[in-house]
Image (cartoon, rainbow, N blue to C red):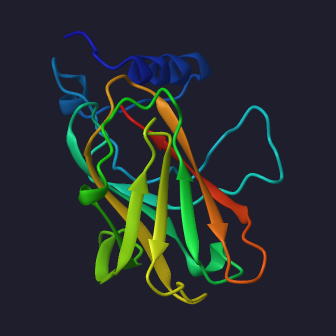
Amino acid sequence: MPIQSKSLRRWIGAAAMTGLALVVPTDLISQGSAARAQGTPSLMEFRWDTDRNYRKLYYYQTSTLESDRSEWYLTLRAKDRKTAVLKLTVTIPDYFDAKLKPKRMSLCRTTAGSMMSRTKCLETIPATIEVNDTQTAIEVFPDQPLPMDGDYSLRVKLFNPRGKRMYQLNALIQAPGDVPMSGYAGSWLIDVD
């Protein structure tokens, strides 16, 4: 039987070159089956151009398949923020071809998922959400500034973009104060298979 997955073939080839014994479950080798990863960030991330100013943010997506219906939770954990949040801006790459609709988005207080539970909204936070005309930015204005403690997520319901690509969405936070200026909080590096 032919092995369908390129990454599985490469892994088997690498194991054979090093002389390791390899036991592969037959359901991975069978024709037409494909292994699917969960829609959470990887445990290890490699970047060619490492920048100490880059901060990886947690996210969860219910599906990683292209053009599939999905919910994305773009999470800002308490440890990722140093201030309260007056305004959140999420920048989107211009090659992101999914339709973003403000009525399909909400801001909520969340509990981060783990091995035994999924990320979910505990409470919806009243907020005004706007998407610019070019679909390259989402602006979230909570009715009350989000406090420094607690985890908050922008929940986006959408059909995943077409094309097997990686998307870097950046979070800019404006803190309460006299100077209306947004600062970089981190990035969500999302993969669509």
Residue 64 picture location, percent across and down:
32, 41
Answer left or right for 80 relative to 28: right
Residue nearest the viewer, comparing 187 with 178: 178
Up-down: is 127 above or below 91? below
In the displayed structure image, the side of residue 123 where residue 8 appears, left or right:
right
Residue at 73 percent across and 63 percent down: it is 183
Q: 185 or 193: which is nearer to us?
A: 185
- What residue do we see at 38% from left, 35% from top? 192
Camera sees residue 113: no
Check the image and name the residue furthest to the top. Answer: 2
Q: Is residue 92 left or right of residue 26?
A: right
Vertical arrangement, residue 84 with respect to residue 1, above or below: below
Q: Position of residue 108 (x, y in %)?
A: 36, 76
Above or below for 143 versus 185: below
- At a point 53% along the width and 35% down the height, the residue shown is 93
Quarter of the image where one finds residue 128: bottom left
44 vs 26: above or below? below
